[in-house]
Image: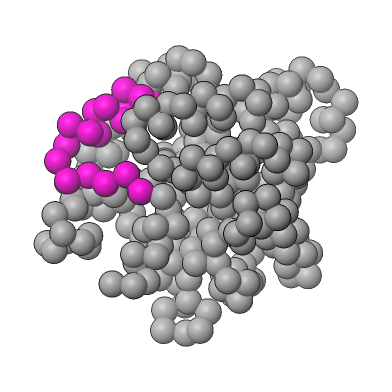
Amino acid sequence: MSGIWPGDTQCVVMLGFDVDGVSSWLNRDPHFAQLPSLMSMAEYGPSVATPRILDMLDNHSIKASFYVPGYVAETHVEMVKEIARRGHEIAHHGYMHEPPATLTKEREEEVLHQGISILGDITGEAPRGYRSPSWELSEHSVDLLASHGFQYDSSLMGDDAPYTLNAGTPQSLVEIPIHWLLDDAPNFVYAPATGRLGPMRNPEEVYGTWAAEFEGLYHYGRAFTLTMHPQYIGRPGRLRMLEQLITHIRTFPNVEFMRAIDVAEMWTSP
Ligand code: ZN
């Protein structure tokens, strides 16, 4: 072992898909439910893009992590079962995509319970990974997650490889850090009805940014963690860009594609 990873591994790649569907829009404004065009654009994520992403991952023999809000899970039970059946991780992502920073401690705990029981009922296993909607934890989140049996959080940006929060205490938790640079949303979200007019970037430009960041993280022996949303990355031209990136990454030796939960477990049991 030369760096932070076991054996010859030089870089770990974690592909994460936040299957927000309509939940993130409805949490922003429940009146959005009355906008069929916006709702259909969001619904494309779980209904059309997710099955396509699952086939693409199978073709490349990659296991990934899927962060599913409770509301999306209970309205797409078969989708969640299929994701789990194919060996991917199902992790917690709120109920109606509520950023914990916007909730009281009591409500935050209620939402945690809701997601745990909905996902647990569908897959037969309580989720052990958590990613906060909009990446906004509250000051209570880490303690709440640790005391509810979670093994990792993935909402913070304090490093570019896993690290331990509350180290040495019973409330310790692995952090799988993320970054806006490695998120599809800032590049692709364009939803005029909501006021979000993102740059709608050319996939080639995003490929360039992500490939450069991968090469840097590989050089330093860190973790490459992509956060994507089926409703954005699942458009055919963008998904082919993701496949091109996977093919590029595979040309580097000693790279492991892993689910975030497996990385978190490896981090806690050396
Ligand atoms: Zn989300």
Q: What residue is drawn where x is 62% and y is 42%?
A: 81
Determine whether, in the image, residue 72 is placed left or right of residue 244: right
Determine whether, in the image, residue 196 is placed left or right of residue 150: right
Determine whether, in the image, residue 235 is placed left or right of residue 122: left
For the record, the magenta segment spans 242-258
User: Can you say which quadrant of the picture contains the N terminus?
Assistant: bottom left
> What is the x, y in percent for residue 99?
67, 53
Residue 165 position (above or below residue 228): below
User: Can you say which quadrant of the picture contains the C terminus?
Assistant: bottom left
Task: Report the number of discs.
Answer: 0
Nearer the observer, 38 or 72? 72
Q: Could one spot residue 190 in this view of the protein?
A: no
Nearer the observer, 35 or 60? 60
> What is the x, y in percent for residue 237?
45, 15
> What is the x, y in percent for residue 220?
19, 51
Determine whether, in the image, residue 193 is placed left or right of residue 19: right
Which image quadrant for residue 141?
bottom right
